[in-house]
Image: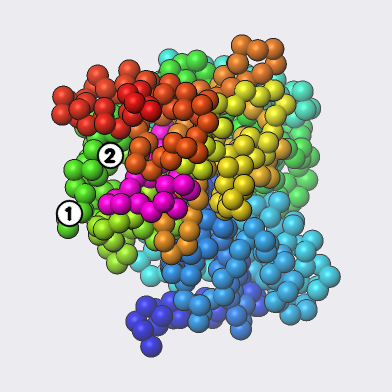
């Protein structure tokens, strides 16, 4: 038996022994932490430890006699590569829910365990509804079963909190809390429980370093109707600067005070059941707390960037555009050199970003996928998978950065060697979809799925598509994936002026190549009654060798010309003469097309 399988089999066996001790016939292990974070501190990478799967979304369900690992369409190929299918089945969580899988596979009357801190109130309720007809019971376990068997379990993060300047935020924490307090009063609530790290960071004008890529502190917050707040956080994280910034209207408590302070709320408590761990649901029932269930009230205002946040975002995107442009020149300079690999490309891009003193770190783990690796939507190069970028094919690089004081996310696909005509045509179709979104003028009640349809139309004409959304919200020196609005086939959300989103259509041919083109866009007033438009704020050249002119309309060529002129205006002056000469060869719509 291979050593890798032996290791995961031993972990699976150890988990099943703990299940028996707890008198549980199954166990649910989602990939998350106690705060529903997207990116996890090492201590919370329990799913990765048990199964080997490293994707950003997933869940494992373990029964006595079988087990499964599920994720979404982004990770179909990655699941096959990383998970031992002799130990775990694999499935698509967008097609098969946890409740569906249990109803199909668990026996009548079984008892399924879970961690009350890792499953939300809403998740537990939905699973119970799905399995009720089989008399399957969901019962929490005493602590997390993985933590019992994980030898050398990493420690809880201990880095200090930092202050996010009011002049960049555009509003003080007190102003934000007063605004939220109006929402509480309007709903008849005395307080609101906030469990999302980026919401807490936004409303307090505080940042942290507890998880990779997103500058948040792992904590909880009670916001009161008078605008005061109680922050439940490790007190060691607070510096004198942070304490001064919080002021006397924000009291800091240890985590163990949570239940007591919740039970002392005099009136309705606002809780978001989709993000609050089920522990909070148990506590509200136990203490007979009157609950109002609705979306976290920080989500929407956080997504609408102030003028100051918009200025900060525009500035850091110019810095990032310089770094990405220099990186694209590096790729050209290293065409078919043996030293160039996926990991080398990742390191080179990070190096160009580090040239700016405003750079803090990546906003997510860089995706640098050559040839067939580019078809793996969320591929991550490892020492084992690291491919030499040599020969003919496409290189897809999706990356982002955290700067003082903004967040970026950009994807470019470039040709290595000689691309096929099919690659060029499909790249151009993706580009047409990208331009359709970027140049759209739409009414204020237009939904995310209506914008999404614009991006997919050029591909769908040829019977092609892609298995991910077209756009997601982005924070201001916060999460690179932000809620409130998305561009995807399932989104009925609308848009507000000031929202910052990605525009990233793609196409992926499994086993051969991947294409994605991504810029960030700000929602702006279109100076037309009741209409909005997108303003692209990411600047780096596209690969002209992959563009088929005959597939572009006159208006699409005009958009490209305007975009290239902005690159020339914003990026060119910050480059060396050699870099400027190279960039001019890529801005072909300005020159000849």
- Say if 585 sits above or below 173 in the image: below
Region in magenta: 406-427
- Say if 83 sits above or below 388 in the image: below
Colour approach in the figure: rainbow
**Point 57% across, 75% down: residue:** 89
Q: Position of residue 7 (x, y in %)?
A: 39, 78
The residue closer to the viewer here, 134 or 531, is: 531
| Residue 406 left/right relative to 495 | left
| Residue 561 left/right relative to 21 | left
Residue 150: image quadrant is bottom left
What is the number of the mark on residue 328?
A: 2
In the picture as drawn, the residue positioned furthest to the bottom comes out as 1
Residue 357: image quadrant is top left
In the picture as drawn, the residue positioned furthest to the right comes out as 133
**Residue underneath mark 1:** 337
Q: Distance from label 2 to label 1 (Cα)?
A: 15 Å
């Amino acid at each position: 038996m291979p050593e890798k399988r032996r290791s995961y089999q031993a972990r699976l066996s150890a988990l099943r022994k703990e299940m028996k001790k707890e008198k549980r016939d199954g166990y649910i292990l989602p990939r998350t932490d106690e705060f529903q974070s997207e990116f996890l501190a090492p201590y919370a990478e329990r799913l990765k430890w048990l199964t080997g799967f490293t994707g950003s979304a997933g869940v494992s369900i373990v029964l006595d006699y079988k087990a499964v690992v599920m994720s979404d369409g982004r990770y179909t190929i990655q699941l096959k590569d990383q998970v031992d299918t002799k130990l775990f089945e694999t499935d698509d969580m967008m097609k098969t829910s946890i409740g569906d899988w249990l109803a199909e596979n668990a026996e009548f009357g079984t008892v399924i365990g879970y961690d009350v801190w890792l499953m939300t109130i809403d998740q537990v309720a939905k699973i119970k509804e799905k399995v009720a007809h089989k008399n399957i019971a969901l019962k929490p376990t005493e602590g997390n079963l993985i933590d019992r068997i994980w030898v050398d379990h990493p420690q809880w993060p201990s880095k200090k909190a930092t202050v996010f300047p009011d002049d960049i935020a555009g509003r003080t924490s007190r102003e934000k809390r007063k605004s939220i307090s109006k929402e509480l009063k309007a709903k008849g609530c005395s307080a609101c429980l906030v469990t999302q790290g980026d919401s807490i960071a936004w409303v307090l004008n505080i940042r942290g370093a507890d998880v990779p890529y997103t500058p948040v502190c792992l904590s909880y917050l009670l916001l009161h109707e008078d605008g005061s707040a109680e922050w439940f956080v490790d007190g060691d994280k607070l510096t004198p600067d942070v304490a001064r910034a919080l002021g006397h209207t924000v009291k800091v408590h240890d985590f163990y005070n949570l239940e007591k302070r919740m039970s002392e709320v005099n009136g309705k408590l606002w809780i978001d059941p989709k993000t609050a761990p089920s522990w909070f649901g148990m506590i509200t029932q136990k203490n007979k707390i009157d609950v109002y269930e609705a979306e976290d009230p920080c989500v929407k205002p956080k997504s609408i960037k102030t003028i100051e946040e918009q200025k900060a975002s525009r500035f850091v995107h110019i810095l990032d555009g310089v770094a990405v442009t220099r990186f694209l020149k590096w790729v050209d300079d290293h065409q078919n050199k043996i030293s160039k690999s996926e990991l080398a490309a990742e390191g080179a891009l990070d190096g160009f970003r580090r040239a700016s003193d405003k750079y803090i770190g990546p906003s997510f783990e860089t995706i640098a996928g050559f040839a067939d690796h580019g078809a793996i939507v969320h591929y991550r190069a490892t020492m084992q998978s690291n491919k030499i970028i040599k020969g003919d094919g496409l290189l897809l690089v999706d990356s982002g950065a955290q700067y003082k004081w903004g967040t970026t996310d950009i994807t470019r696909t470039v040709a290595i060697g000689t691309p096929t005509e099919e690659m060029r045509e499909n790249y151009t179709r993706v580009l047409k979809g990208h331009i359709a979104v970027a140049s759209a003028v739409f009414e204020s009640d237009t939904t995310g799925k209506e914008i999404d349809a614009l991006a997919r139309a050029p591909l769908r004409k040829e019977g092609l598509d892609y298995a991910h959304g077209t756009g997601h919200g982005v924070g201001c020196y916060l999460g690179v994936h932000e809620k409130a609005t998305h561009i995807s086939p399932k989104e009925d959300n609308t848009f507000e002026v000031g929202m910052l989103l990605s525009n990233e259509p793609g196409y992926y041919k499994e086993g051969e190549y991947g294409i994605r083109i991504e810029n960030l866009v700000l929602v702006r007033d279109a100076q037309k009654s009741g209409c909005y438009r997108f303003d692209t704020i990411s600047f780096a050249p596209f690969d002209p060798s992959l563009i088929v002119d005959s597939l572009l309309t006159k208006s699409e060529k005009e958009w490209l010309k305007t975009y290239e002129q902005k690159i020339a205006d914003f990026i060119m002056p910050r480059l060396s003469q050699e870099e400027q000469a190279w960039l001019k060869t890529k801005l072909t719509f300005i020159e000849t097309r």
